[in-house]
Image (cartoon, rainbow, N blue to C red):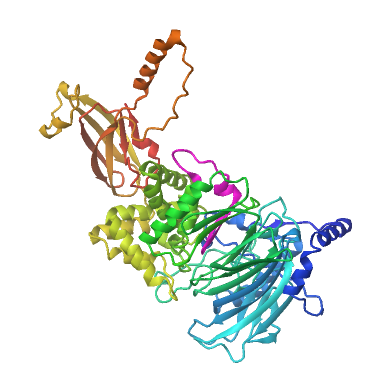
Amino acid sequence: MRRAVGHAPSATRRAESSALARERNELLLPAIRAVHPRKPKGQDPAIHVAPQLAPHEARQPGPLPASARARNVASDRYEKFAKDYWRKNIATWKDAPKPAIVAAEVDLVLEPARGFLHSKGEYTLFNDTQKPLERFPVSKGPHYKNVHWTLAGAEYTPEDRAGLEIFTPKPPLAPGASLQLGFELEGTFPEGATKNGGGTSDFVLPSGVVLTSFGPDFVPMIGYSESVGVDDDNKSDPKVWSKDWYEGITRASFGNNLPQTTKITIHAPAEYTLNSVGTLTSDTVADGIRTSVWQSDHPVNFFNVVAGKWNVKRGKGTAIYYHPGHEYNVDEMLECLDGARQHYSEWFYPYPWNELKLSEFPGIASYAQGFPTNITFSESIGFLTESDPKAHAAFMVTAHESAHQWWSNILEPGEGPGGDILSEGMAHFSTILLTGEMRGERERIELCKRFEERYGDGRQVDSEKPMIELDGSRPGDRVVLYEKGGWSAWMMLQLVGRANMLRGCQEFIRKYEKGPDHPVLQDFTPAIREFAPDKVAYDAFVEQWYHQVVIPEYKLENVTREQGSAGVTWFEHMKDKLLPGDSGWEVKLTLHNAGSATMPVEVCASRGERFPDEKPAAKKQPEEPSDSNVVAAAEQSAKKKDAPEPYRDSRTSVTLAAGESKEVVIHCAFEPQLVTVDPDALVLQLRRKFALFKF
């Protein structure tokens, strides 16, 4: 895990910084004190380690390399604390049982001008395990100062284990019982500066605020974080899982094990808009301070806070909050957001929250996250991305993050191999469906090809594991998780049928949406099997694509074409397809599968441009009487020349085993120009460019 290391400022710069901070916050601080009065001063608290949650990106919504999510570390001293956190707690608290949060109430004060936050709140914890909890761990951040705790309403001092706080309720928390954990803290976040600039994923800064419950940014994190203090020197081999590990109750992969209700109250300077999960129930301004209250209108698994000086554009139960001047892709993104809410609700599960919003944050980090009701986007992803006519990048990222409302939030996958496929793979699958529905077949095909290229270029052949064994620990796992995961579901839909696939997804989400058992891929494939018309073919498909590492690779060899008048046998039923001047053509070729998977695939001979580019109309030139006839003739000639030829094709289906070759004949009612394997991008394959031949 990459860590960004800062440097301590000189005494002079510290003094200057303090003076500027006091001046900037002269009006804000009295209001903060009124909201969150300080506790009496006592002994200065020790600086503790931050559990820096930086798991594989699949454990957090949104397509982002784990290194880019690494938390900011203010100094080398924090590196030592991270090691102490790991050394002192790994043996005792890794995989230790912990309670689930079923209600969270937080009152948060933000001072973006100096990166300051003050947080006060209470969790309702619930023992969803089968045994009494005699003690449980809570992780806090290294930036926490003046920390105070309560347990069951009483002041409490937990055991401090290098940043991991151990609570021992009396009596032990019984199965099915609950208690309240209260907290109050403040701090600067992030402290210092990153080593090379940027690279911190969460922050309180004048340009914007991003805070999440994935780690101890502004609220404590229940449990121990395995990623803290781990580097190349002490990195362990991946866990070995038994074949039936997923049977019984599987805990959640990320976030909270049970859905929770939330009430998040945020205070900040009035010029900021303050967003969190749920519904905005109150938004007031007094003495230059804005106070916004967000409450969950349907339980959530995790929550975030994001703030900025935004404009807003609203759609149909949707909204995009964006920086003024960043309107470039807003219409495209809002169209996608509207379509995602409508179509994903129809396909998978009715959207349970009142509004779906998307909020922009500064490009200090480049990622997007699909929190429930409150998607966050870096300005460098989506907002400032140039789309092209064949593939609209802003639409694609918005579709993927919107899909996490269903595949991560409504349905939270289980922890273990194959779990994250149900988050990132199914978000890619959803993106393919939505692109086809809203942007048309051309863009859907281009998107599938782009995903396919990423998989082919990024996979690690020697270390790639079957998707049911995928745990995100190996190089190349990301493209299997996202691209191959999405493509495999897309191919599954072709096999079982669109209506059957969507019915299966709906039943699957309904079964697992509330927990406490969280599904993995091994639960998903049997669920869809119930809706497969041909269960033998379905079982063969699942075995091949999910339990093995195989993929086809098609090559066209010895491709020829011959006109009917030269002796080609022509079928009577093709005569009505001939246009004037046509006499029928025959294409002969050898199709070779150099890959390892067996799939039915179409081979297509075609003529004309299937998806002709839309060209802008030519500017009208000023007419000159003396040349009017010449100009008119030239324009007519250009129109005739530029008019696209009607697209025609003829297809046949072929099934090849690994290493097999077959002779293929395609009869055409036209002179073919192109031969393509899998023209509709329905079969994931390697090196698609070799499956194309131009005469």
Hey, which quadrant is residue 649 in on the image? top left
The quarter of the rendered structure image containing the N terminus is: bottom right
Relative image position of residue 121 (x, y in whole percent): 65, 76
Towards the viewer: 68 or 687: 68
Towards the viewer: 197 or 628: 628
Is residue 375 in the magenta section? yes
Towards the viewer: 181 or 266: 266
Outermost residue toward the right in this view: 12
81 is higher (above) or lower (below) than 565? below
Outermost residue toward the front in this view: 625
Magenta residue span: 368-394
Towards the viewer: 299 or 509: 299
Identify the residue at horizontal 37%, vertical 58% (top origin).
Answer: 546
Outermost residue toward the bottom in this view: 171
Hey, which quadrant is residue 674 in on the image? top left
Hey, which quadrant is residue 640 in on the image? top left
Q: Is residue 464 visible?
A: no
Q: Is residue 345 visible?
A: yes
Relative image position of residue 287 (x, y in whole percent): 74, 66
Relative image position of residue 578 (x, y in whole percent): 18, 28
Is residue 471 in the magenta section? no
> Is 625 situated left or right of 609 in this image?
right
Identify the residue at horizontal 45%, vertical 24% (top origin).
Answer: 618
Outermost residue toward the left in this view: 572
Relative image position of residue 245 (x, y in whole percent): 42, 72
